Image (cartoon, helix red, strand yellow):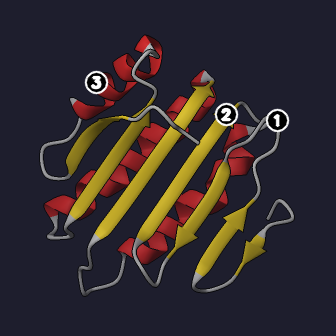
C-alpha cells in the first residue's frame, strides 16, 4: 500500500503532495490522518484504509478508539471517503465502542471549521470534538 509501512499492528504512510500522512496504530486504537487529500484515485487510496478500520472494528471486544484528523484541504472524493469512515466509527460507537473523533483545524481556517461542524452533525454516539489548534499537521 503506497510504499508505507503496513503490518498487523500499524499502517504508516508518508504524506505526499496529494495524499495525507496516515498513522493507524491498531494496538493503541489511535488513528491519524493529516495534511492534504486529493489523490488521483481517492477510492483506491482510501479503500485499504477503510477495510483495515472495518476489520479492526469487527472485533467482538469493544476497545477505545481515537481518530485524529488534521487536514488542510481535501477534495470531494476524499470527503466521501471520510464520510464512509465516520459512518463506520459512529456504528461502532453505537455498538459500545468508546469512540472519539478529534477534528483539528487552524483557528483562522473557516472552511475546515465548517467541514468539522458539518461532519459533527452526523454523530450521535461517538464523541466528535472540534479542536482549533494553531499548529495543525
Q: Earlier in the sequence, mark 2 or mark 3?
A: 2
Return the mark for residue 17: 1
Return the mark for residue 117: 3
* Image position, residue 61 (x, y; %): 24, 87
* In the image, residue 76 above or below residue 85: above
Per the model, the C-alpha gap separating discs 2 and 3 is: 19 Å
Per the model, the C-alpha gap separating discs 2 and 1 is: 7 Å
Q: Residue furthest front?
A: 134
Neighbour tally class for label 3: few under 14, some 14-19, many 20 plus, Cα within 10 Å: some
Q: Residue furthest right?
A: 3
* Image position, residue 46 (x, y; %): 64, 50
Quadrant of residue 56 within the rendered picture? bottom left
Residue at x-position 77% and y-position 36%: 39
Q: Secondary structure at mark 2?
A: strand
* Image position, residue 5 (x, y; %): 76, 74
* Image position, residue 58 (x, y; %): 36, 77
Mark 3 and mark 2 in contact (Cβ < 8 Å)?
no
The total of numbered circles placed on residues is 3
Per the model, the C-alpha gap separating discs 3 and 1 is: 26 Å
* In the image, residue 3 above or below residue 27: above
Residue at x-position 46% and y-position 84%: 27
**On the image, numbered disc 2 is attached to which residue?**
36
Q: Earlier in the sequence, mark 2 or mark 1?
A: 1
Mark 1 and mark 2 in contact (Cβ < 8 Å)?
yes
* In the image, residue 107 above or below residue 60: above
Amino acid at each position: 500500500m503506497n510504499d508505507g509501512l503496513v503490518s498487523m499492528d500499524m499502517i504508516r504512510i508518508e504524506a505526499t503532495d496529494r495524499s495525507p500522512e496516515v498513522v493507524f496504530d491498531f494496538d493503541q486504537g489511535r488513528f491519524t490522518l493529516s495534511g492534504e487529500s486529493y489523490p488521483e484515485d481517492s477510492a483506491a487510496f482510501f479503500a485499504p484504509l477503510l477495510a483495515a478500520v472495518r476489520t479492526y472494528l469487527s472485533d467482538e471486544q469493544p476497545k477505545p478508539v481515537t481518530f485524529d484528523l488534521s487536514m488542510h484541504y481535501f477534495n470531494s472524493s476524499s470527503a466521501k471517503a471520510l464520510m464512509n469512515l465516520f459512518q463506520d466509527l459512529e456504528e461502532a460507537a453505537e455498538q459500545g465502542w468508546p469512540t472519539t473523533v478529534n477534528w483539528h483545524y487552524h483557528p483562522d481556517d473557516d472552511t475546515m471549521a465548517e467541514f468539522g461542524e458539518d461532519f459533527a452533525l452526523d454523530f450521535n454516539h461517538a464523541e466528535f470534538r472540534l479542536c482549533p489548534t494553531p499548529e495543525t499537521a
